[in-house]
Image (tube, grey):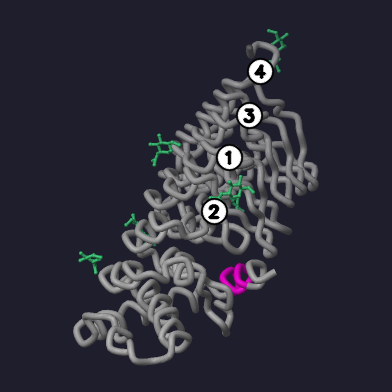
Amino acid sequence: MEGNIMVRGVARCWLCVGVLVLMTVAVSQAETKQKATNPCKYTKHLPTKKRKLCHGLEMLRAASTGEKKIVQELLNQTETTYLLAYTEREGWRRGFTALLLAAENNHTEVAKLLVDYGSDVNHTSSAIVYLMAENGALDTLKLVLNLSAVADVKTSFGLSPLLIGAWNGYSGVVKALLGVGANPDVKTPLTLYSPLYMAAKAGDKTMANYLLSARADINVVTSWGVTALMTAIVWGHEEVAKLLLDKGADPNLAEKDGMTPLHYCMVPREDEVEAGQKAIIKKKAELIRLLLEKCPDPTITDVTGKTALDLAKMSNSTELQTLLEGYNRSNCN
Ligand SMILES: *[C@@H]1O[C@H](CO)[C@@H](O)[C@H](O)[C@H]1NC(C)=O
Ligand SMILES: *[C@@H]1O[C@H](CO)[C@@H](O)[C@H](O)[C@H]1NC(C)=O
Ligand SMILES: *[C@@H]1O[C@H](CO)[C@@H](O)[C@H](O)[C@H]1NC(C)=O
Ligand SMILES: *[C@@H]1O[C@H](CO)[C@@H](O)[C@H](O)[C@H]1NC(C)=O
Ligand SMILES: *[C@@H]1O[C@H](CO)[C@@H](O)[C@H](O)[C@H]1NC(C)=O
Ligand SMILES: *[C@@H]1O[C@H](CO)[C@@H](O)[C@H](O)[C@H]1NC(C)=O
């Protein structure tokens, strides 16, 4: 439950997290100069309970600011188990351990130290794996995965470490998660974006390859019925489009407007129109040639009753039109 609340907080508050991290970094840099050592050091005269509390709070502070020396100093004492399990008591980080704070703020050295000392890598719904994937902290991610941290958790917000890692473009993270058996076909809620869709949109051939090797569904669709192939075409990523076609992506699937990959080759995006007609046509022509090798059905019509050839005619490009007119599916194999 704590984990759920926490991760929902994280997901809702991307920007705040970014701002907080920046602020924390700024504060920590200022603080490191003044507080080079543990402020609880001189509280030995305090009752044990109060001293432990001081150490617990100091541990959380130092973990979130990445002050390795202080964390090491604290761990060097006898209360290690207590310190590793000590959590934030309030705010939306309630339940965060020092390791979670280090993971959130991407302090990999501190995170490694905490893991070495035996911090629970499964604490609060494996949010540790999620935060490390989000930050692209590959080394520490591998470390906790190697300790059998749960990789395939779905947060209450519906995101998983694989989705956030793919969304942020970390192909190494994607590979590591797939390596421990993470499900490649997880999807975001509502939009139903899959990691393969994200890789295709970003034109990340390496990531797409990892996902396909892990048997991701090549014809996976979003809530609008858009395939990874269509996305690669829309964003002009020929290499990814070629990879998908070579690995057997269906060239005839249509999304909710009835548009097939071939239809998508005919419509430029707005930002492409600004890039100039000639360049657009050249790119579209390359994509069409790739598609035509896979013998698509050119007679499929969209919801307005238009075939890809109709769209080509509307685009006023004789090159695209000629390409399609010269295509005879019965001679294709
Ligand atoms: C940890 O404790 C050992 C002895 O118990 C000491 O030699 C070492 O310097 C301490 N390390 C830190 C970082 O405090
Ligand atoms: C987190 O740290 C790792 C390793 O130090 C680094 O590669 C990665 O870019 C960092 N992530 C962010 C979001 O700064
Ligand atoms: C993972 O754990 C195995 C043993 O369980 C070990 O041989 C291997 O070196 C570890 N890998 C990493 C990256 O820590
Ligand atoms: C984390 O949880 C998984 C699944 O419950 C378990 O197999 C694994 O041993 C746990 N790892 C640690 C270090 O507790
Ligand atoms: C194609 O040409 C016609 C007539 O010249 C024009 O009305 C139409 O806007 C043009 N379409 C595009 C996409 O440029
Ligand atoms: C397509 O090719 C087949 C076989 O070569 C031929 O019979 C048919 O007339 C061709 N269709 C068109 C529209 O050219």
Residue at mark 3: 249
Q: For the residues labelled 3 and 1, say whether their Cβ atoms are less than 8 Å apart.
A: no
- Above or below, comparing residue 247 to residue 102 in the picture: above
Q: Which residues are magenta?
A: 6-12
Cα separation, mark 1 vs mark 2, equals 10 Å
Amino acid type of the residue tagged 3 in the rendering:
Ala
- Determine the residue positioned at 67% across, 50% down: 187
Alpha-carbon span between mark 1 and mark 4: 18 Å
- Where does label 2 land, which residue? 269
In the image, the residue with mark 4 has its CB under 8 Å from the nearest atom of ligand 6: yes
Residue 76 placed where, x, y %? 31, 67
Tag in front: 3 or 2: 3
Residue 265 marker: 1
**Whether residue 95 is situated above or below residue 49 in the rendered picture:** above
Looking at the rendered structure, the secondary structure element under dot 4 is loop
| Callout 1 amino acid | Cys
- Between the residue at mark 2 and the residue at mark 4, the CA separation in whole angstroms equals 28 Å
- The residue carrying mark 4 is 328
Left or right, 109 with respect to 138, comes to: left
